[in-house]
Image (tube, rainbow, N blue to C red):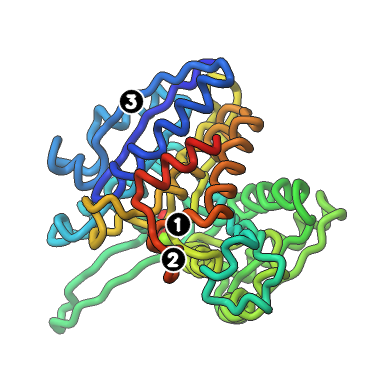
Amino acid sequence: MQINIAILPGDYIGPEVMAVALPVLETVLRRGGHSLKYSTHAVGGAGIDAAGKALPDATLEACQQADAILFGSVGGPKWEKLPPHEQPERAALLPLRKHFRLFANIRPGFLPKALLDASPIRSERIPEGIDMVCIRELTGGLYFGQPKRTTVLPDGDSEAVDTMIYRKSEIERITDVAIATARARRRRLLSVDKANVLETSVLWRKTVTERVAATAPDITLAHMYVDNAAMQLVRAPASVDVLLTENMFGDILSDEMAVICGSLGMLSSASLGDVKNSHGLPFGLYEPAGGTAPDIAGKNLANPCAQILSAALMLRHSFGLHAEADAIDVAVKKTIADGIRTADIAFGAIAVSSSEMGAAVLARL
Ligand code: IPM
Ligand code: MG
């Protein structure tokens, strides 16, 4: 199989962890007899520096030609003084998600037993570790709703507005993704909203309930308000199987999920939509969800696992290469089980560098 991808490393630790993940991807593909064809393009702050905008035309063009995007991370202090809508996150990542209609964000939260000590949750509360998935709606809600602006009022005061808006059809299609995900797992779906306050959440809860009743009687559905869900995630994380929620709540809860699973440096993600690639599989954007970590950039310290695991998600969803994706997942788990840890998950043990972590994963692969 020809694996044709656009690589967008981005800023700060983005290029560092990408450089560690790439040999892992190349190795697993070569071994499977597949050929990797990729081109690398500037995005985010790097795009601003190279071409004057966060999502240069040439970068978008390259993504359009590819079957998937392997993304690093964007943003950081260097570009923080730009007007908000020109900053790397808002001007690169969000337009990419919108352009390719990547409405489904899949974030696996996995804490293996070997990493129990890296979780801020006491080990006796999660003796078997944590294994959940967050399904986050990614192209609607507060992030994209219009109007979205800041105005100076006649009396001199300033006013800002974001709009939270959802259509029933948007809720139905993300519910379908959550149902499919739950079917491949423990068949339990937890839908999170704020239906005691928000209109969009009332529609969310009604739509999810009806969709599951009509199409997925085999799935056990529960609903929870987002404040309660934030609490239950730390109180009883092992009880969660598939968590389904809207854009903003998913942004917040997935960071919480990541840290109870050890570290943001372990959180991979897949963003998928209804666009198919040349293999007839979902076109997707695959990215670690932990950000650019400017404080440790350039020091070869960042945990490359989220980037490596994002590459595995890409092989699975956009290329159907499940054996190759499994091999990467297993190699990462073995590395961690062998006690090889970057600083974010070392907790007192001797930490290895980013490139040493990558070499250890490669060796186990
Ligand atoms: C994430 C990130 C982004 C988001 C930022 C960088 C715009 O936090 O992917 O979770 O809020 O979606
Ligand atoms: Mg986030």
- Where residue 363 sits: x, y (%)? 50, 36
Q: Are marks 2 and 1 in contact (CB under 8 Å)?
A: yes
Q: Secondary structure at mark 1?
A: loop
Report the amino acid beneath label 2.
Answer: Ala
Residue at the spot 64% in from the left edge and 47% down from the top edge: 173
Residue position marked by numbered label 3 in the rendering: 62
- 263 w.r.t. 185: above or below: below
Cα gap from disc 3 to disc 2, whole angstroms: 42 Å
Q: Nearer the viewer, residue 263 or 50?
A: 263
Q: Which quadrant is home to the C terminus?
A: top right
Q: Residue furthest right?
A: 217
Q: Please state the horizontal and vertical placement of residue 216, each as a whole percent of the image.
A: 82, 51
In the rendered view, tell whether residue 96 sits above or below residue 84: above
For mark 1, what is the residue?
Answer: 341
- Camera-side residue of 235 and 271: 235
Q: CA distance from mark 2 to mark 1?
A: 8 Å
Q: Quadrant of the N terminus?
A: top right
Q: Nearer the viewer, residue 327 or 211?
A: 327
Residue type at mark 1: give it.
Arg
Please determine whether, in this image, residue 30 is positioned above or below residue 123. Answer: above
Q: Position of residue 22 (x, y in %)?
A: 40, 33
Mark 2, residue position: 349
Q: Tell me which amino acid carries mark 3.
A: Ala
Total residue callouts:
3
